[in-house]
Image (cartoon, grey):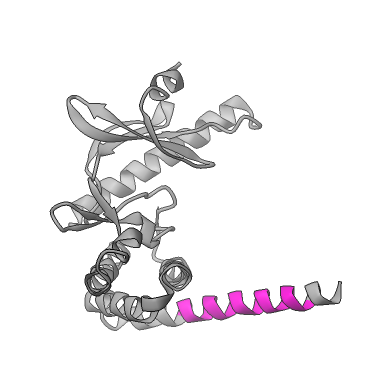
Amino acid sequence: MFSEWTSKLALVKRGAESEIRLGYFMGIPAIFKYRVRKPYMHPKLAQALVYMRTRREAKVIAYALSRGIQAPRLLAVFPSIGLIVMEYIEGVTLKDYTNIDQVKAVEYSRVAGRIIGMLHKAGVSHGDPTTSNFIVSKSGELKLVDYGLADFTEDVEDLAVDIHLYRRAVESTHAGIAYDMYEAFIGGYKSILGERAEKIIERAKEIRLRGRYVEERRTVWGALR
């Protein structure tokens, strides 16, 4: 089976939806993203889901690259077996980079805002834009990876979720510089989308308030139990 072959590659990360492995493709260092079929699903349904999601992710990456967005270069796509092969970006995640140089990390956060702005301008939401999914490459470029939850959309709510997720990530992981990182991110974002950014940012604030309300209600009900 193909999964037996991929198991021989170095495991980088294993999630509920996929495995990320490191190896070589035609002599080039590459990342192999292999979507795992759900064992509880009917085989035909599981196969269809893997095919659809693999194809969509590859399509989004290809489109992002065509719009000048810093994303991993596609090397090969095999939707029928749920495999995407892409370039290996050697570097450090923005999450870890904050422990190396906080001042520069804030500037990279501004670049991250521009990247998400370009993605939104192109009609794409990322779905998981945390600091773990931005990589500072060895050449100093910031690249956005993991498009597994990305989709084509113009919906303000979908785009605002990206803003909310980034803010939540910096506040929970980089508390000491969270304000500076988020403000830099928003500055970069606005530089790409201009006035259109305001509506999306306002919706992100609404989403944040909704989350706080739900959490407060959970706390109240928990205290009453």
Which contiguous range is marked in magenta?
Answer: 203-220
The residue sitting at 39% across, 24% down in the picture is 6
The residue sitting at 42% across, 26% down in the picture is 81
Furthest-top residue in this view: 1
Q: Quadrant of residue 171?
A: bottom left
Predominant SS along the magenta part: helix
Residue 170 located left or right of residue 63: right
Q: Nearer the viewer, residue 152 or 94?
A: 94
Picture quarter with the C terminus: bottom right
Q: Which of 55 and 39 is in front in this view?
A: 39
Residue 66 located left or right of residue 80: left
Q: Where is residue 188 in the image (x, y as percent from the top left)?
A: 25, 75
Is residue 202 depicted above or below 55 in this figure?
below
Please state the total of marks drawn on the protein image. Answer: 0
Furthest-left residue in this view: 139
Furthest-right residue in this view: 225
Residue 1 located left or right of residue 90: right
Is residue 138 depicted above or below 118 in this figure?
above
Instruction: Report whether residue 124 is seen.
Output: no
Q: Quadrant of residue 69?
A: bottom left
Q: Position of residue 32 (x, y in %)?
A: 34, 33
Instruction: Report whether residue 22 is seen.
Output: yes
The residue sitting at 41% across, 54% down in the picture is 151
Is residue 143 depicted above or below 201 in this figure?
above
Residue 170 magenta-highlighted: no
The residue sitting at 42% across, 47% down in the picture is 148
Residue 209 magenta-highlighted: yes
Q: Where is residue 35 in the image (x, y as percent from the top left)?
A: 46, 35
Q: Position of residue 28 (x, y in %)?
A: 18, 31
Is residue 14 depicted above or below 158 in this figure?
above
